[in-house]
Image: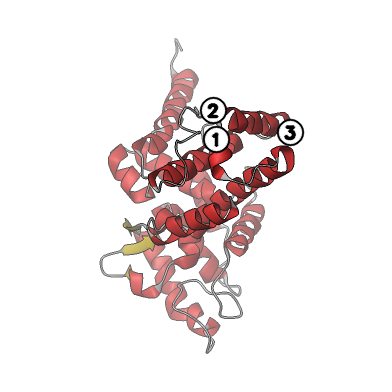
């Protein structure tokens, strides 16, 4: 079973071009299933796996306290794994074919309002060391709705100052073009002309945002920077990088942007992922109506 998993992960990497994080997550799910099969039932061959066996494993994981969203990831991993094996003739039938995905309660994403975003950005002191960099980062997160990994990997050659466009590589190594707002462009220009040259070292790459050592910023470091400025801003809301992405989408929708355009800018493969923001906006509309309508 381990050899089959390795072969499948290579398929995801080479033929499907899926991200390293997705490969690692899928490999972990499948390896944990293989270990359970070996320890509990002495099964180490994929052809001996049955639907009742998979159902028993999922029930076992549920009893251990695993959330529905985590179980859904395992189900998806098992389904695409056994579909792959069946297509290669490695198993006579796909034992996971009848598996259904668990229902997951969808939570509406948290967002900042426009005044809170302004307060966060205005609280960054650009006169201190790395202030220009940090402001440019947070401006760009909000202006273009980037994921943290996309911000970390943003490169100079992919940013057009004249067109105010940034080419980013998102999930599944898919490339998309995102517009960059005027204020974010101004913040980027100030950082690139004044502060970034001072951070350059001989080993520096062409990433837009560099650390004090001249290396690419990690996603964990970007998280820390956003949290630091959120604390200094005086906002009591729990602020993190992805919150700015949610706010970007919600504010676009609230100001009349088309949902399909927002989907394209966010890099969502499925429109249903983007549709959650319509519910957020409806909540805002209802709250305004309740607050201001005399007969609400």
Q: CA distance from mark 1 to mark 2?
A: 6 Å
- Mark 1 and mark 2 residues within 8 Å of each other at the beta carbon: yes
Residue 146: x, y in percent? Answer: 44, 55
Q: What residue appears at the point 65 percent right and 58 percent down from the top-left corner?
A: 228
Q: Taking 133 as reference, is 17 above or below it? A: above
Picture coordinates of residue 180 (x, y %)? 35, 59
Q: Residues within 10 Å of mark 3 (few under 14, many from 20)?
A: few
Image height of 208 relative to 224, above or below: below
Mark positioned earlier in the residue sequence (3 or 2): 3
Q: Is residue 157 left or right of residue 229?
A: left
SS at mark 1? helix
Residue 111 visible within the image: no
The x and y percentages for residue 169 are 39, 61
- Element class at badge 2: loop
Determine the CA span between mark 1 and mark 3: 15 Å
Q: CA distance from mark 3 to mark 2?
A: 16 Å
Q: Is residue 18 left or right of residue 176?
A: right
Q: Which residue is mark 3?
A: 64
Q: Which mark is residue 102?
A: 2
Residue at the disc numbered 1: 72
Per the image, label 3 sits on a secondary structure element best described as loop
Query: Residue at (29%, 40%) from the top-left corner?
Result: 260
Q: Which circle marks residue 37 in the picture?
A: none
Instruction: In the rendered view, tell whether residue 27 sits above or below residue 183.
Output: above
Which x, y percent locates residue 179?
32, 57
């Amino acid at each position: 079973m381990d050899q089959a998993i390795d072969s499948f992960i290579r398929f995801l990497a080479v033929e499907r071009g899926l991200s390293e994080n997705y490969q690692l997550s899928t490999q972990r799910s499948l390896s944990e299933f293989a270990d359970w099969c070996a320890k509990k039932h002495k099964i180490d061959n994929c052809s001996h796996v049955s639907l009742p066996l998979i159902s028993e494993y999922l029930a076992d994981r549920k009893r251990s306290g695993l959330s529905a969203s985590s179980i859904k990831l395992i189900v998806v991993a098992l389904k695409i794994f056994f579909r792959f094996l069946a297509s290669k003739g490695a198993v006579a039938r796909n034992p996971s074919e009848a598996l259904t995905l668990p229902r997951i309660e969808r939570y509406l994403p948290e967002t900042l309002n426009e005044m809170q975003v302004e307060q966060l950005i205005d609280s960054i002191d650009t006169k201190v060391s790395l202030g220009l960099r940090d402001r440019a980062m947070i401006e760009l997160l909000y202006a273009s709705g980037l994921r943290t990994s996309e911000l970390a990997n943003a490169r100079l050659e992919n940013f057009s100052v004249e067109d105010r466009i940034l080419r980013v590589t998102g999930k599944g190594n898919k490339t998309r073009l995102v517009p960059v707002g005027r204020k974010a462009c101004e913040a980027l220009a100030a950082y690139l002309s004044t502060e970034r040259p001072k951070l350059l070292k001989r080993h520096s790459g062409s990433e837009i945002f560099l650390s004090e050592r001249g290396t690419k910023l990690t996603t964990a470091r970007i998280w820390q920077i956003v949290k630091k400025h959120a604390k200094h801003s005086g906002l009591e809301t729990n602020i993190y990088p992805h919150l700015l992405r949610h706010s970007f989408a919600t504010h676009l929708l609230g100001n009349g942007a088309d949902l399909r355009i927002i989907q394209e800018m966010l890099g969502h493969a499925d429109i249903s992922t983007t549709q959650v923001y319509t519910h957020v906006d409806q909540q805002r509309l209802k709250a305004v109506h309740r607050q201001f309508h005399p007969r609400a």
